[in-house]
Amino acid sequence: MSPLSRSTQTQSGLLGLGSPIARQLLLCVVIIAAFVLMMIAGWNHYADKFASREEFLLSPRDILINKQPSWIHSNVLIETIEKNKFPEQLNLRDRELTAKIATTFSYHPWIRKVNKVVKQYPAKVLVDVEYRRPVAMVEVAYADKKGNQLRGLVPIDAEGFLLPDTDFSPAEAIQYPCILIDSKKPSADMGKKWEDPRIADAASIAVELLPYWNDLKLKRIVLTTEGGSHFELELADNTRIIWGSPPGKELPQEAMAKHKVQVILQKAAEASLSSNQAQPSLDLRTAGRGVAGTEAVRR
């Protein structure tokens, strides 16, 4: 036999198909592949049954959310479920479930912020939210279906976001500070911020005065342009107190909001603001330097 024929001869080496090791490796590959296929088939068979176990299913009405504050009379949970058409059952195995719930609840006008959504086993979902708090009512003018001109009150929170007016009876609405800017109805929907930034400015004043509003016999927060644009406080007898700029936007040398409130409380304690007689005008912008003016201010 020539050297050429010997050099091209095929022999059964260690890795050849004819070797015992190769046959064992091939057998192992076949067994593993068969096992994987069986697992996939078994999972497909039992996945639906496993996913439908009660431990993973929850009715949307069983979602646990923070207790509503006393000023909210509607049911935030039920309204959110019905408006957004939740499915009859929620599956905790849905990886997007917490994000979906957080986004949906954040749209409700009474919810300022969704802090977190937590899933627990067996089926339970906890929603931690921060509710909006009403601080004032904005006086607006509008026409009814018959064209009659009417006036109404629109509730807002400290940031000027519109709140559901259906949660307030007339008796409850008048307990809040009233704001008068230009009487225009907002174009924004409930849960959105009033487009006029002056509303939020007035709301920040209401926040400072809310705890004392009724005791001080205050009636409205009014924006006036006489002597420069500024806010005034109107009492029940139509007497005006000059407040000035909204909190955080005070002009140079203007007293801060906290100090303005202290001056009003001091004057009330002296019974200088609570009688039915005309009172001396009070300019809170210069409250730190004494009372400005002595002439009664009436509108």
Image (cartoon, grey):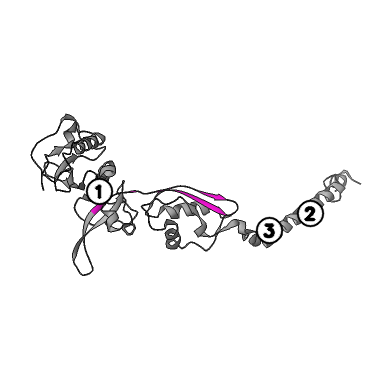
Between the C-alphas of marks 3 and 2, the distance is: 18 Å
User: For residue 148, what is the image quadrant?
Assistant: bottom left
Q: Residue at x 33, y 59 (%)?
A: 166
Look at the image and give the residue range highlighted in magenta: 114-138
The answer to whether residue 14 is above or below residue 266 is: below
Q: Assign a secondary structure to mark 2.
A: helix
Q: Nearer the viewer, residue 296 or 121?
A: 296
The answer to whether residue 278 is above or below residue 108 is: above
Residue 112 shown left or right of residue 38 in the figure: left
Identity of the amino acid at label 2? Ile
Q: Position of residue 285 (x, y in %)?
A: 18, 35
Q: Which mark is residue 31?
A: 2
Q: Position of residue 199 (x, y in %)?
A: 25, 48
Q: Residues within 10 Å of mark 1 (few under 14, many from 20)?
A: many
In the displayed image of the protein, which residue is found farthest to the bottom? 146
Q: Residues within 10 Å of mark 3 (few under 14, many from 20)?
A: few
| Secondary structure character of the magenta stretch overall | strand
Q: Position of residue 283 (x, y in %)?
A: 15, 37
Res. 98 visible in picture: yes
Q: Residues within 10 Å of mark 2 (few under 14, many from 20)?
A: few
The answer to whether residue 164 is above or below residue 232 is: below
Identity of the amino acid at label 1? Pro
Between the C-alphas of marks 1 and 2, the distance is: 79 Å
- The residue pinned by badge 3 equals 43
- The residue pinned by badge 1 equals 177
Q: Please report whichever mark, 3 or 1, sits nearer to the chain's N-terminal start.
A: 3
